[in-house]
Image: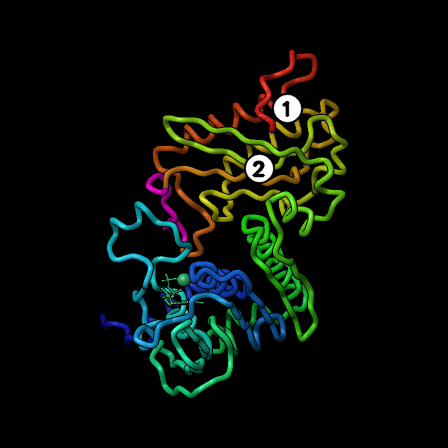
Amino acid sequence: MKQLPPDTVRLLSSSQVITSVVNVVKELMENSLDAGASSIDIKLENYGLDRIEVRDNGLGIKAADTPVMAVRHFTSKICSHEDLERLETYGFRGEALGSICAVAEVSVITKTKEDDISTHYTLNFTGGIVSQKPSHLGQGTTVSVLKLFKNLPVRRQYYSSTKKCKEEVKKVQDLLTAYAIIKPDLRLTLVHNKVVVWQKAKVADHRSALIATLGPSAVANLLPCHHHQEQPEIVLEGFFPKPGADHSSTSSSNPDKTFIFINNRPVHHKEIMKLLRQHYTAQYPDDSARNRYPTLMLKVTVPPSSVDVNLTPDKTQVLLQDKVEAVLTAVEAFLVSLYRPRGDPPAEKQLI
Ligand code: ADP
Ligand code: MG
């Protein structure tokens, strides 16, 4: 038996963290949000395979931190595992930039408030700086990822069909929509091959963000809802289809307009999704809404110590630890009060 060479180990583990174009966009965008950006511009070339560029107006990276910014397991966000209990940032593992360096060519331009000018860094396979030069950008950070998966031919091969590539751009758009809804004051643009394919301006609140992303007609049939419970502390907020509204205007045949957030993270949560669909479709006794997914936004907030975001490398699945039953019970009670079966007396209003 032989030990694998370090470069092979690095490539293997990085390719588990960085799995797709959309996954790179998500990691870079979350870094921008963690840096307090209020404006993020994303550019793709050739569906992201030739170039993914994410530019923000956040805090920038301090010159002293740049030598380790892309070295794996270096992070400015937590110091020890106890900090995970209070986690308020999207990132914490110090893995994304380093992993991207192992599967693509990466450069970073950054400037903090204290810096006179920005600096352009070119990084190598291990995340080290190979060269740096002065640059002309304003405060913030721009990360450019060229030739994604250049050293993973099988993964690159996955994108050889135009259909798959187009699906990937749609996934990027769905991801941006989710962040646009949860962060109303964020300005976001997506450019593909120099054409603006999606954009959202800064708006005042979640409702305006829903209108900006889904359109006024989709939102006309949504009701703002709020439910706060103590012990265990759970806050449910969001916008739900009006009971009894025509389901063609309040649902879709796929889940891309059902937005679930746990502590501000867009997540896929099978059990919550199942409940949402069950209660929504049960309102239509003729079974006509059976295969539909409700258009809605559900924002679940629980103390950070009850959420484990370490379940999957992309953090889109989270464990609610001992709170899962309590959250499901709260969501269910809330849905029952909203979509009570016809003929029942009106439920206590939790709607605002
Ligand atoms: P993590 O986000 O888990 O800390 P990353 O590899 O994604 O790990 O990023 C490493 C570090 O680089 C971050 O902790 C942060 O200090 C810095 N960084 C990365 N991207 C940005 C950005 N857009 N703006 C400011 N700092 C950044
Ligand atoms: Mg990160």
Q: Quadrant of residue 79?
A: bottom left
Q: Is residue 249 left or right of residue 341?
A: right
Q: Nearer the viewer, residue 72 or 210?
A: 210
Q: Quadrant of residue 68?
A: bottom left
The residue carrying mark 1 is: 339
Under mark 1, the amino acid is Tyr
Q: Nearer the viewer, residue 219 or 255?
A: 219
Q: Residue at x 49, y 62 (%)?
A: 37
Q: Secondary structure at mark 1?
A: loop
Where residue 106 appears, x then y in whole percent?
Answer: 45, 77
CA gap between label 2 and label 1 equals: 15 Å
Residue 200 falls inside the magenta stretch: no
Under mark 2, the amino acid is Gly
The residue carrying mark 2 is: 238
Q: Give the magenta part as a residue range.
A: 304-312
Considering the image in quadrants, where does the N terminus appear? bottom left
Where residue 341 appears, x then y in whole percent?
Answer: 65, 18
Badges 2 and 1: C-beta atoms under 8 Å apart? no
